[in-house]
Image (cartoon, rainbow, N blue to C red):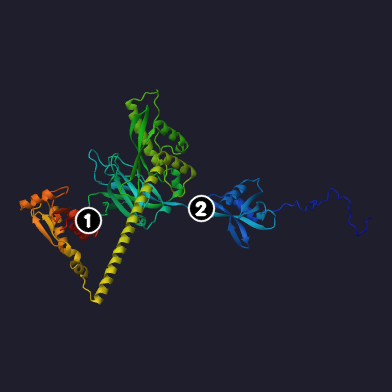
Amino acid sequence: PPPPDKPSTAPLDDDEDAPPPPPPPTSSGRKRKLSKRRASALSLLKEENTERQWEFEMRRGVWAPYPAEINKKLILAMSAASSKAIRIKLRGSAYTVDLQRMTMKTAMGARVKKVRCIAKRKKEKACLRFKISCEDLINVDLNSDSDPYCIVTQGTKVLYQTEVIQDNLHPSWDAFNVDLAIIDMNREMTFSVYDYEVIGAHELLGRVSLSANKLIRAGRNFVVELSDECGLDLGGLGRMRFHYAEVAKASGLARRGSLFPSPYLTTVVGRAKVGGHIMYDIRVVAPLADTKKPLEWTIRKKFGLIHKFHDSIKGFLAKRKGLVKPFPPRPRVFFSHSEQFLNERQSGLNAYWDSLSKAVPGAHSFEGKEIKTVRSQLYKFLEVDEHMSRFRRRKDEERRLRAVSAADKKLQEQRRELTKLRKKKAQTTRKKMGVAEDWKLERLYNSPEIQAIKNVVVFVSMCPASTMIRKHTMSLVNLFRALNIKFETKDVSSDRRSREYMLENSTAANKRLTPQVFKGGKFLAQWPQIQDIHEEGKLVSFLLSAAATTGK
């Protein structure tokens, strides 16, 4: 028998239960449990309507988010099951992020930091939904009723533009939505109704200004009288009915495809045959809040280019069946462009562009990449950026000129105030010194230069042919009297000899025009020349030099 201090190693019988053998000891190959941070990061991959943000621990308990590019890279790496580690560059240093252990360390492995992935629930987008109509609008067209459409603005922002309803004084537009992120609920929104004109400016039919909060509190079927462009309710312009104005979630509405229609109206207004090609004129109307009328321009495109643009957005239109009218077909036989076929194709193009402007949404804060691409293609085809940039340059130049003129006016006012202050200061000084206020006139009256001017004759007409001649005569006489210049007047209307003398010795362009100034029997000047010389301050020297030349 074996010694009692040693256990028996003999095999047990078959009827006895043997315990399972223990696993072989492993030091490095032991399976590690997934950390809580990795488990939470994997669970976030299955959640919807959430934004994932990766963070690293700067110091104990303080987490900092990764930049957007690195965050996107980590999300893609976590989604791929094969990737276990990823290299990134953060703040100029290279790091390796271990997605198994959820750690981050430098390339040398000296510093090890924890990483984690947290969820940020996406905010539910909301919009303001409207349904409006008008009643008893005024008719501004001669042969038919008005063609109204409505532009919704707030300040300088254009929020929405409705479709055009032809020949209707009681229009009811489709329901539309405005993104709450771009409006102020307490500020007034202006609903302006215009009459669409193919040729000429669009005429304002009326407008209403109300805040969004007031419209929501007013409830359904709220009626407001239209006012003119100055905001005055003159009566007889019609009424606008708000069927409802309510806040709605945009997540469900955005799937319908035309949540925010394009703010540009497009209409095919004509066609022409140029060089064997059929060219169509497409008129684009862009509403602008800071102008009295919308900005308009016309582009001329071949039918082939229009068809090529339609082919480029076929994928977008396939998802919105029923929203866009079918594109008109090509003729079955080449060069069979009959007048009836061209008329039908033009009406089809008009319906296509009208529906396309409703199907392509305008810019909003929760749009997709596909919608942005299609809108950029549409705006490029319609030359929107070119015309809008030209318009903005013109507006900026007008603002600059207004600012310059305002600055010039301000500078002139400052100069006038400075001149007034100087005059006031000089008057105060003269008053202290006991000098009279008209010291300049007294000095001028008594000057030897004025006393030396003699033999000045002014030929006038006491029965002038016009009011201008009378004003010129009175101005000349008053000027000479104010300067204390001695002169003699002769009436050429009653004295025949004076009239003949003036006509014989005058060298003026119009010898019959009075008043005329003579000095020593020699013609000097008429009133316009005398006025210019006086403004230059050289009238006395001019009369003295004339006296010296005449010798009298």
Any part of residue 512 in sight:
no
Q: Position of residue 252 (x, y in %)?
A: 45, 47
Which quadrant does the C terminus fall into?
bottom left
Q: Please tell me which residue is depicted at 32% across the width and 42% down the height of the picture.
A: 164
Q: Position of residue 492 (x, y in %)?
A: 8, 53
Q: Element at badge 2? A: loop
Contact, mark 2 vs mark 1 (Cβ under 8 Å)? no
Badge 2 crowding class, 10 Å Cα cut-off, few under 14, some 14 to 19, many 20 or more, is few
Q: In which quarter of the image is residue 105?
A: bottom right
Identify the mark nearer the N-term, 2 or 1: 2
Q: Position of residue 445 (x, y in %)?
A: 18, 67
Q: How many labels does the image show?
A: 2
Question: Amino acid type of disc 1?
Answer: Asp
Question: Amino acid type of disc 2?
Answer: Lys
Q: Please tell me which residue is depicted at 43% across the width and 40% down the height of the picture.
A: 380
Q: In which quarter of the image is residue 82?
A: top right
What residue is pinned by disc 2?
122
Any part of residue 353 in sight:
yes
Q: Please tell me which residue is depicted at 20% across the width and 56% down the height of the picture.
A: 531
Badge 1 crowding class, 10 Å Cα cut-off, few under 14, some 14 to 19, many 20 or more, is few
The residues bearing labels 2 and 1 have C-alpha atoms spaced at a distance of 77 Å
What residue is pinned by disc 1?
532
**Looking at the image, which is closer to me, 22 or 495?**
495
Q: Element at badge 1? A: helix
Q: Where is residue 446 in the image (x, y as percent from the top left)?
A: 18, 68
